[in-house]
C-alpha cells in the first residue's frame, strides 16, 4: 500500500505578519517556517497506518520554493519514506487550483491508495486543495476526519468526520482524499535517529514540465494584502459601579450596537 | 570561518526545544518542589535519542555529534536543570568513556542499553576526601583470580540511585598513586554494591545524587575499562566532555532565566512605563544577554573541537568556567529584574537561581577550572 501525504510549509504560528512592499505578499524575511499543523496530523496518521499494517510506503509531497525542502525533511525525520517536491518558479504565483493540479499530477504518477492532508493550511486558511485534488482525480473526499480505519482488504476506509455535536461515519472507497482535523492524533517528535536518517532519504525535485502542466494564470489572483487596522484603545468608564454599569449597557447598546 | 548549524543540528535543536517546552516545562516546578525523579520524561528522552546523542547507531545511540548534543542539552536546561544533568552524565561521563575505551563486548553490554535510553549510567569518581583532589582515591580493588574485590565509598554521584551501571574508579595499586587508578563497570544488583543516602540539595532537586557503597563487591576483570592504571586518564578525558555538557547546561539555565526576565521587563510597569524602558533594567538585560551569548559561543567552540576529535581541555574548561559563572550571575540578575516577585516560587526564576549554583561546583569547581586554564596558558601541563 502507498499513502501520499500533502503538506504545506507555512510561517510559524508565532510570526508577526507584515505586508511586503509589493502589497501582494507577506514579508518573508526572518520568518521561521514550519509544516502546517493540520498536515502534521496527516503525516502522523500515515505513519500509524504503516505501523499497523506494515508494507506501507509513505510519500510526502509539497509545492513551493527551495525552502520547502526543510518541511519535507522534517516529515522524513518523523518517518516518511521519501518526498516529492514540486519546485518551479512558474508556479510561484499558484492559486489553490494550480497547486491542486500540480499535486494531482504528482499523485497520478505515484498512484497511491490513499491521500492524506490537513483540513487547511494555517497561512491563508483556504482549505480548498483537498477537494480540488479529489475533484481533478475523480476520487471521493472527506474533510475534517477525526478517525480512520482501513478495511483489511484495503479497498475502503471507514472515517469519522467532525460535525456539530458528533461524528459522521462514512465508508469511503479507495483511493480517496482525506483531510485531517485536530484531534485525529498527537503527532510524534522526530527522534534523533529519524533526523540523522532523513538526509539519506530521497527528495525528488519535479518541474511543471515533468508533470505536463501547461502555463496558466491564477484564477484567484491576489489584488492586495492589507494589515489589520490597529485596535482602537479601550475606554474606562469612571464612577460608582451602579452608574458605570448603566453607562456600559447604554454604550454597548447605542454606540457599539453589540447588545 | 563558518558559524552556522547544519540542517540536522537545527532540527535536533528544534525537536529538543519543542519537547522540553511541551513535556518538561509543565512538570519542572513540581519535581523540584517534591524532589521527584522524573522517570516518565527521562524515558521519553531515551526514546527520542537524547541519551546517547554522539554514540554511533551500532551501539544504540543516535549517531549524531557533540555540537547537536550541546544544542539539545541547552534546550532541555532552559526548562529544567535536573533533566539536563541526568542527560549530561548519561551522555558525557558514562557513555563517552565506554564508547572510547571499552571493547566491543563491553559496548554491547554496558553502552547499548544506556545510549538507547533503556537504562541509566553514572560516573563514580568523587569520594568524601576526593573531590577537587580527585587523585586521592581511597576505594580499592584487589585482584583475586578473574575478579576484583572492591571496597570503598563514593559520594555525590549523579544518577547514583537510578542507574543500572556505574563507571567506577578505584585504586588497584596504591603505590602508584593516581597511576594506579583503574576504571570498571559495576552493575546494579552485584552483591556488595549498595546505594547509601540520597542528598537533599539546594538545586537540581529532581536529579538524584547518591552515595555508592562497595563492600567486598566482586567485579569481573572483564568489566574493567581500559588497562589497570589507565583510570585517571579516562576520568580526565571524560571530564573534558562532561565540562562541555555542564557548560551547555549552564547556558540553558542562564538563557531560561533571561527569557523570563525579558518577558517580565516587557510586561511589568512602574512609573507608567514597562520596566525594561528604565535604563537600569535595560542595561542589566543587555549585559545578561551578552554574557549568555558569549558563554554559548565558548561552549559551541569546545563542542566543535571535541566533535572534530581535537584536544579541548583548555577550551572545555574555559567554557565551563565562564558559562557557570554566567549562570549564577544571570539568574541572580533575573531575580533582581523581578524584584520581590522573583523571590516567590510562582515566578520560577528562584528555581533557576538555586539550580545555577551547582554548575560552579560539579565536574570541577570554578577554582579547578581556573587551575586547568592557568596551567594550559602557562604551558606547564603534566
Image: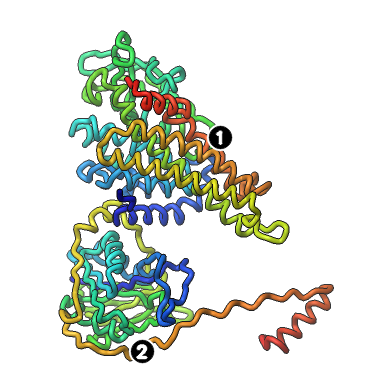
Front residue of B97 and B272: B272
Q: Quadrant of the C terminus of chain B?
A: top left
Check disc 1: other Cα within 10 Å, few if <14, some if 14-19, many if 20+: some
Tell me where residue B273 appears, x and y as whole percent: 68, 60
Picture quarter containing residue B114? top left
The colour scheme applied to this rendered structure is rainbow
What chain letter is assigned to the residue under label 1?
A: B
Check disc 2: other Cα within 10 Å, few if <14, some if 14-19, many if 20+: few
Please tell me whether mark 2 or mark 1 is closer to you in this view. Answer: 2
Name the residue that disc number 2 marks. A220
Picture quarter containing residue A187? bottom left
Picture quarter containing residue A118? bottom left
Circle 1 — which element?
loop
Circle 2 — which element?
loop
Which residue is at a point 41% across and 25% down the rendered structure image? Answer: B374
Q: Disc 2 and disc 1: Cα gap in Å?
A: 62 Å
What chain letter is assigned to the residue under label 2?
A: A
Count of numbered marks = 2
Name the residue that disc number 1 marks. B202
Amino acid at each position: 500500500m502507498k499513502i501520499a501525504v500533502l503538506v504545506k510549509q507555512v510561517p510559524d504560528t508565532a510570526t508577526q505578519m507584515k505586508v511586503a512592499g509589493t502589497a501582494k505578499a507577506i514579508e518573508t524575511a526572518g520568518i521561521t517556517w514550519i509544516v502546517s499543523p493540520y498536515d502534521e496530523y496527516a503525516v502522523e496518521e500515515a505513519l500509524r497506518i504503516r505501523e499497523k499494517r506494515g508494507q506501507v510506503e509513505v510519500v510526502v509531497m509539497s509545492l513551493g520554493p527551495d525552502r520547502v525542502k526543510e518541511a519535507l525533511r522534517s516529515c522524513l525525520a518523523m518517518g516518511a519514506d521519501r518526498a516529492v517536491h514540486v519546485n518551479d518558479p512558474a508556479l510561484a504565483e499558484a492559486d489553490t487550483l494550480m497547486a491542486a493540479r500540480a499535486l494531482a499530477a504528482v499523485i497520478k504518477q505515484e498512484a497511491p491508495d490513499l491521500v492524506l492532508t490537513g483540513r487547511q493550511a494555517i497561512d491563508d486558511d483556504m482549505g480548498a486543495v483537498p477537494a480540488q485534488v479529489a475533484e481533478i482525480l475523480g476520487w471521493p473526499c472527506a474533510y475534517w476526519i477525526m478517525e480512520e480505519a482501513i478495511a483489511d482488504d484495503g479497498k475502503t476506509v471507514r472515517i469519522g468526520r467532525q460535525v456539530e455535536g458528533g461524528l459522521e461515519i462514512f465508508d469511503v472507497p479507495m483511493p480517496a482524499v482525506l483531510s485531517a482535523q485536530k484531534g485525529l492524533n498527537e503527532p510524534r517528535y522526530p527522534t534523533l535517529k529519524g533526523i540523522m536518517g532523513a538526509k539519506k532519504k530521497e527528495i525528488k525535485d519535479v518541474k511543471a514540465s515533468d508533470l505536463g502542466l501547461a502555463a496558466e494564470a491564477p484564477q484567484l489572483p491576489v489584488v492586495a494584502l492589507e494589515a489589520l487596522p490597529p485596535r482602537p484603545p479601550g475606554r474606562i468608564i469612571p464612577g460608582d459601579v451602579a452608574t458605570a454599569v448603566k453607562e456600559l449597557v447604554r454604550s454597548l447598546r447605542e454606540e457599539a450596537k453589540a447588545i | 570561518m563558518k558559524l552556522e548549524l547544519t540542517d540536522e543540528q537545527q532540527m535536533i535543536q528544534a525537536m529538543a526545544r519543542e519537547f522540553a517546552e511541551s513535556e518538561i516545562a509543565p512538570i519542572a516546578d513540581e519535581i523540584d518542589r517534591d524532589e521527584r525523579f522524573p522517570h516518565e520524561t527521562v524515558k521519553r528522552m531515551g526514546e527520542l535519542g537524547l541519551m546517547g546523542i554522539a554514540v554511533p547507531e551500532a551501539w544504540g545511540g543516535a549517531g549524531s555529534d557533540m555540537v547537536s548534543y550541546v544544542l539539545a542539552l541547552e534546550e532541555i536546561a532552559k526548562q529544567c536543570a535536573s533533566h539536563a544533568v541526568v542527560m549530561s552524565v548519561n551522555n558525557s561521563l558514562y557513555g563517552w568513556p565506554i564508547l572510547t575505551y571499552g571493547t566491543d563486548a563491553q559496548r554491547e553490554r554496558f553502552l547499548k542499553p544506556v545510549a538507547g535510553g533503556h537504562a541509566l549510567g553514572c560516573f563514580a569518581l568523587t569520594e568524601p576526601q576526593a573531590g577537587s583532589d580527585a587523585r586521592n582515591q581511597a576505594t580499592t580493588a584487589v585482584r583475586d583470580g578473574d575478579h576484583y574485590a572492591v571496597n570503598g565509598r563514593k559520594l555525590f554521584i549523579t544518577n547514583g540511585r537510578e542507574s543500572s551501571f556505574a563507571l567506577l574508579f578505584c585504586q588497584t595499586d596504591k603505590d602508584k598513586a593516581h597511576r594506579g587508578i583503574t576504571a570498571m563497570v559495576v552493575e546494579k544488583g552485584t552483591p556488595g554494591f549498595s546505594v547509601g543516602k540520597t542528598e537533599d540539595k539546594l538545586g537540581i532537586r529532581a536529579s538524584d545524587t547518591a552515595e555508592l557503597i562497595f563492600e567486598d563487591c566482586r567485579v569481573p576483570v572483564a568489566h574493567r575499562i581500559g588497562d589497570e592504571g589507565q583510570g585517571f586518564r579516562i576520568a580526565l578525558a571524560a571530564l573534558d566532555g562532561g565540562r562541555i555538557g555542564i557548560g551547555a547546561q549552564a547556558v540553558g539555565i542562564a538563557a531560561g532565566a533571561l527569557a523570563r526576565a525579558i518577558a517580565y521587563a516587557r510586561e511589568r510597569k512602574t512609573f507608567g512605563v514597562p520596566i525594561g524602558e528604565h535604563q537600569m533594567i535595560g542595561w542589566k538585560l543587555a549585559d545578561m544577554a551578552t554574557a549568555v551569548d558569549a558563554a554559548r559561543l565558548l561552549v559551541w567552540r569546545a563542542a566543535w573541537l571535541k566533535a572534530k576529535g581535537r584536544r579541548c581541555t583548555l577550551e572545555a574548561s574555559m567554557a565551563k568556567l565562564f558559562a557557570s559563572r554566567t549562570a549564577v550571575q544571570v539568574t541572580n540578575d533575573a531575580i533582581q529584574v523581578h524584584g520581590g516577585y522573583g523571590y516567590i516560587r510562582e515566578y520560577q526564576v528562584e528555581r533557576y537561581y538555586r539550580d545555577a549554583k551547582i554548575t560552579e561546583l560539579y565536574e570541577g569547581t570554578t577554582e579547578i577550572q581556573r587551575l586547568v586554564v592557568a596551567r594550559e596558558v602557562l604551558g606547564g601541563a603534566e
